[in-house]
Amino acid sequence: MGKLILLAVLAGGGWFAYRHFTGGADYGRSTDAPLGTFEKIDRHLIDAKFVRSETSVEEMDGNLVQRIPGAKVYLYQHVRKDLEWTDSVAVCLDERGQVRGVGARFFTGRREFSPGGPPAESFASDFWMQVAGAKPDLKTRMRGQGRLAEEYLEARWAGQGLKGEWLKRGMSGRLDGSVNDSVTFYTKE
């Protein structure tokens, strides 16, 4: 039992050192590619056992692709058998092949930010920390009134020609343990 605890402590320490000294995964971010390169993001997601498919803007839902008209969209899915749920990451490219948007949707069940967890959450957390430079500052918001009111958490970030948004919503309109996360980053152009 003591060896198991020591192994867990060493693994956690190794993860912390990796994140602290390397800044996380290499997404190919630079001044010319503020959201990274498709090749680096694609390799990272494939290595994390996501399944990639190409889709059209018309077939996608959500805010990300609406902000990037004419985008080529690659959808990465990771099936979570424990929840019978599919987490997803979308990468949107403009006509030149530049990454113009990155989004993720996943189930956490938590109100707070977490740097770990299932693959989509780990990717979104690492990507947010690298692009925004800090964890998301989630604020409680309410939409609507009375029994139809929806409670959710929201963080917004803008800088370096980019915008980011992290939303946590409950399935029943309340943040009661059935929390779904939606994370998007896109260029302001």
Image (cartoon, rainbow, N blue to C red):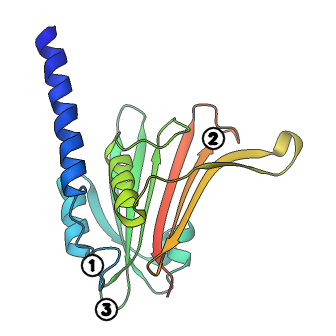
The CA distance from mark 1 to mark 2 is 37 Å
User: On residue 70, which mark appears?
Assistant: none
* Residue at numbered disc 1: 30
Apparent side of residue 162 relative to residue 6 in the rendered image (left or right): right
Kind of residue sitting beneath label 2: Met
Residue 96 is labelled as 3
Q: Residue at x 85, y 39 (%)?
A: 147
**Does the image show residue 48?**
no
Pointer 2 or 3: first along the chain:
3
Residue 45 in the image: above or below residue 161? above
Query: Could you say which quadrant of the image residue 54 lies in?
Result: bottom left
| Residue sitting farthest toward the top | 1
Q: Is residue 183 visible?
A: yes
For marks 3 and 1, the one nearer the N-term is: 1
Where does the image place residue 70, in percent across and percent down from the top left? 46, 87
Q: Residues within 10 Å of mark 1 (few under 14, many from 20)?
A: few
> N-terminal of the two: label 1 or label 2?
1
Can you give x and y, in whole percent of width and height, for residue 49 in the image? 22, 50
